[in-house]
Amino acid sequence: MWRASILTLFPELFPGPLAASLAGRALAAGIWTCEAIDIRASATDRHRSADDTPAGGGPGMVMRADVLARAIDAATPAGDPRARILLTPRGRPLTQARVRALAESTGVLVVCGRFEGVDERVIEARALEEVSIGDYVLSGGEVAAYALIDACVRLLPGVMGKEASQAEESFEAGLLEYPQYTRPQVFEGRAIPEVLISGDHKRVEAWRRAEAERITRERRPDLWARRKGQTTERE
């Protein structure tokens, strides 16, 4: 069973949207578990303080190292092999390759940052892997946790209906996904490309490949350059 433990100041936000659709059905089926842990439960003062003013001055508050460390230790006892991920805008971008690796592991511990950030000492002392889901700032890591966990859960065995569909999705082959069409055959004067209704599977496959490459070149030149570099290295 794949285990997701989420350290957060707002445990009531979970499982939230993770209780719906594919992830929700998998959760109900026992394919994975979702444990939301209140960081404030590890505080020692009567106000359950988990943050304090930043050393050196400045605006906002910073999550305390001692409180967060106790919460992490309680959630991941000795021998727990799961990755410890801190969701933060300064982290390394989350990739499909990293998602797949996490999905193939036993689970993940996700730390949802808040305020101005987390005391650097607990990041170092507890070997937190800093991960970002994009170049923008959220109010906290909870929304990012939804994205990370959903991306992992859908790859678990038995969650998706057709395993083959995973291989054709965006990023799986270093390309964005090709355009998709369905009924009606003509919509507001726009017809489904003839090749897709030709019945010629080789032509369909070639068209989809060409479209995936075109879209990747146009929309994500960074991905295209990386893919071309990797292809060149293999040759």
Image (tube, rainbow, N blue to C red):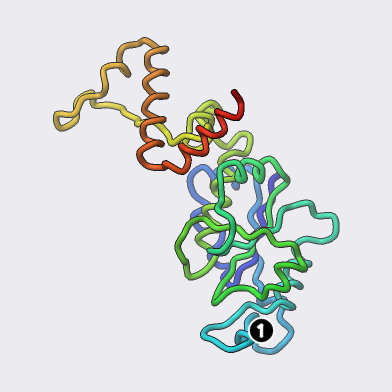
Q: Residue at x 66, y 73 (%)?
A: 39
Percent x, y for residue 37?
66, 66
Q: Residue at x 63, y 62 (%)?
A: 86
Q: Quadrant of residue 180?
A: top left
Quick check: 28 left or right of 165?
A: right
Q: In this view of the protein, can residue 15 be seen by the observer?
A: no
Q: Residue at x 35, y 11 (%)?
A: 199
Quick check: 117 left or right of 17?
A: right
Picture layout, residue 191 above or below residue 66: above
Q: Residue furthest left?
A: 189
Query: Foreground residue, 214 or 77?
Result: 214
Q: Residue at x 42, y 18 (%)?
A: 205
Q: Which residue is the site of mark 1?
A: 48
Picture layout, residue 51 above or below residue 209: below
Picture layout, residue 39 above or below residue 187: below
Q: Residue furthest right?
A: 78
Query: Foreground residue, 155 or 57?
Result: 57
Percent x, y for residue 24?
54, 47
Percent x, y for residue 185?
23, 23
Q: In this view of the protein, can residue 133 be seen by the observer?
A: yes
